[in-house]
Image (cartoon, rainbow, N blue to C red):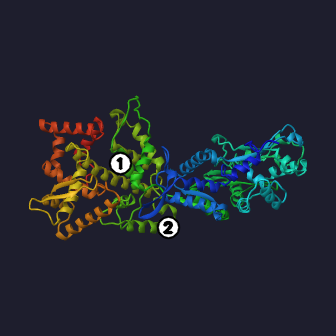
Amino acid sequence: MVGKTDPKTLISHVDAVKKGKRVFEDAFQGVSRMILDAGIQKITVKGKSTYQFDIFSQGKKHLVGMYDEINSFVSFVKDASEGGSSREMAFVLVGEPGNGKTFFVEYLCARYREFLSIPQNRKYTFRYVNLDQIGGYGKINFIESQTYEDPMILAMSLCEIKDESKELFAKKFKFTASQIDNLYDKYRPLGACSAYILNQIREHCDNDINKMLSFVEITPVPLIESLGTITGKYPAKDKITSSAVDLMGEESIQRLLHISDSNNPYRFDLRRGALARVAGGGIHFSDEIYKNKKDLVQVYLGVIQNRMIEMDGFKWPIDTLIIATSNNSEFDSFLSEREEAPIVDRCRICYVAHNTDYKIQKTLTEYAIGTDTKRSLDSKILHHDPNLNYAASIGVVLTRLPRSDKLTPVEIMKLAAGEIAGEKSLKTLAELIDSLNQDTDITKRFGQKGLGQRNLGRAVQLLLESSETNEGQCMFALDIFNALERTVLDYVQEPADRAKFKEDLKIARGLYRERIMTEMFNAYMDEPLAIKKDVMNYVNMIIGVDAEYLGPDMMWKYKDPQTGELKALKIDERYIKNVEERLGLKTEEQRASFRNSIRKIYGQKLSVDANYDFMDNLELVKAITDVRLKSDIAGAGSLIGALANRTNEENQKLYDRMIYTMNEKLGYCRTCAQKTIEYFCSQEDDK
């Protein structure tokens, strides 16, 4: 017999599991360990505490947002790994097209493969060798477990009676009583063909365990993605060609030519189906599960509940995490057929919403634009307008937000991104989300409707193919709104949705206009962060204006929380008053209330983030921009006038200087700098 040190023997495998060098765990325990060991952060999203799992934010192209969905999934897997009811369920992601369902599952599968490629996490299976000694298998010399069963399952079934196998573990493998109990908690019977062949070997060896072990060889489960082992995807096929064979396998005529015993369950080729290949602790991904025809859904019914492949009375237990996806419309039509209720009953349905955080959307927009260098149709490199990502992100996010009587779309957008929205609190947003999520119509829930990632991708394609982009060799931000409107017209079918999305894109253009005002001020001041400095000056002035030790020269000394340096600031009451007038604060009470709210935000935010700069307070930024433009060049209109009318030398110099600053310091190219100034000078989108 082969020695104990040979890693291919069952004895050495059991010994490695005992010493912790190899693992014996099911799919749920493996996935759960992979997620939880990678690290967890506690975060606040839309006013509620939730968890962020580090495994989902690794790599170049990772999951963005999806906090609730990931939390639901982790909770589902964790419950299943602890023996909960989730073990007999499938996890189904239901939502609008293009919101990341399939990407989520494929990302999870890729991480799981990486996790299993670490030597101590590897999955092993066994094969029966020397079958020519037993006879009856023709030219078949070795047979691998068809469902990639773990060698520990074989070890627990070496003897015919369970108690005898437990004794074997105590005597031969030197396991303690508690180790044996823990091991048998994970016990499941061998599959039909593995058990049948083991029985033949047992009879041939006359129950001599050492002789029996010489017929067993341990082998690692292949991690080759294209084989569909460990992680396999079953896409919904057309109604005619798809059948249960694709999932379960079928009787193999080729094997029948070799096997003389017609009762031998090995005559069934299980690997012909998708399930057997992931049955050894893998993930089975059923894409668009409810698009499958009825008899296939009935097959899933048995597989999900019993975790078993059954054919002609033979059974093969499988250890698989089953994840599926479905479209909202497909799911609705499936639910309308009452007789299909049992399958839905065995699924943990998770409704996937679109991303509604415009800051997080920036990463998703980068995915849509692509990381490679973009080129025009005549192969010249295209420049990206620095405002392109912002414009595209707010455009699509606003379409995903609901209408509300209590909050404006911009307030919802800012609160959803964790920003300040005037007097409105996160509590108002949390109440709005809760009330919407009570609706039985899924599409009316928060973030369920809107332009998805695919629509954003289409808009970027339209932008790339337009003559303006190719001629100017620049992807100009304002043009993305026209591309998004075209996408709404071409791909949104519901008239009500189309009207709402168009209105949302108008609001987005208004926000873009405000951002351009800020950009033009920075360009005019020849300073990339000019407006940020002025905003922080205003905030520091209203904090210092009530200071006890403020002298008649109105100089106030304070410690900068970002650098820790002591700074001096001259408090300009006229400037403070001008800003507050721009904000529409007429009375002393209104001003005092506004100042108190700014001080309160300052105290709350700086304790968490020392670099907080108030730039998310759009009303304040706009008011300060207007005041500075008014004081520096008698009225914002005059700057527009100076830039629009370049007949005199001074205006031309100002224009040239601003173009230079935009090129050198703000990331614009000549085309988008000129187009942005042109847009600033027009009255377009001005509220």
Secondary structure of residue under mark 2: loop
Q: Position of residue 660 (x, y in %)?
A: 23, 36
Q: Can residue 145 be seen in this view?
A: no
Q: Which badge, 2 or 1, is on the more N-terminal residue?
A: 1
Q: Where is residue 600 in the image (x, y as percent from the top left)?
A: 28, 65
To which residue does mark 2 refer? 439
To which residue does mark 1 refer? 391
Q: Quadrant of residue 675?
A: top left
Secondary structure of residue under mark 1: helix
Residue at screen point 42% across, 54% down: 498
Task: Report crowding for label 1: few under 14, some 14 to 19, many 20 or more residues within 10 A (C-alpha).
Answer: many
Q: Are marks 2 and 1 in contact (CB under 8 Å)?
A: no
Q: Nearer the viewer, residue 669 or 440?
A: 669
Q: Nearer the viewer, residue 111 or 635?
A: 111
Which quarter of the figure is the C terminus placed in? bottom left
Q: Position of residue 240 (x, y in %)?
A: 70, 47
Q: Quadrant of residue 336?
A: bottom right
